[in-house]
Amino acid sequence: MLSKSPAQASLGKTLRVLARRGKANRSLAKLATFLDANPGIDLSCINLFDDAVVSSLNWKGIKKRRNEVLSQLQTYQRVMRLVEGADRTVVLGLMGRGIGSARHVTAIPRPRFLEAFADLFDGDRKAVDRVYQCALVTRSALLLRYLRFRQSHEPHARQINRLTRG
């Protein structure tokens, strides 16, 4: 879980450079502090919803902002899953512009998203479109999962389950 990941090793440094250039939200500075204190964290596979895992991380210097930073880490993971190759500059750039999930991406019309975020991908409109497509797939899968859950908890579904088990 805390294995050395070269792709994540200088994430804190990248975040500070982006903040200086104005490409990342300044509120992400505490995230950089956390990442510097935890250089071996692999954000692609760590379970940030497991209290034991979260407690084992180094929160030195940001204990008062722990919940805020944890929320930013969870957002980073969600956005990272949308970006092919998990390019940290792109992920942080998207976060700095208010993108925190597939839902945020798909709330923007495709042409507008392609135009507004092409600079993060060095003008590669195909890469921007792949992020949009991934966000559509993710949002659709989550919506179907939610609907399945809701339908399985309807009174008639519970009654049918009781009848078929008994």
Image (cartoon, rainbow, N blue to C red):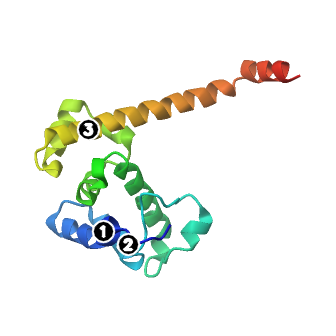
Q: Residue at x 13, y 43 (%)?
A: 124
Residue holding disc 3: 130
Residue 67 appears in the picture as rendered: yes
Q: Nearer the viewer, residue 76 or 63?
A: 76
Q: Residue at x 47, y 58 (%)?
A: 45
Residue holding disc 1: 11
Q: Which mark is residue 141?
A: none
Can you tell which quarter of the image residue 42 is in?
Answer: bottom left
Can you say whether 74 is above or below 14 in the image? above
Instruction: Specify few, some or many for label 2: CA neighbours under 10 Å numbering under 14, 14-19, or 20 or more.
Output: many
Spot occupied by residue 151 in the image (x, y as percentages of width and height): 64, 24
Q: Residue at x 61, y 64 (%)?
A: 51
Labelled pair 2, 1 in contact (Cβ < 8 Å): yes
Q: Residue at x 41, y 54 (%)?
A: 77
Looking at the rendered image, the quarter that the C terminus falls into is: top right
Q: Which mark is residue 35?
A: 2
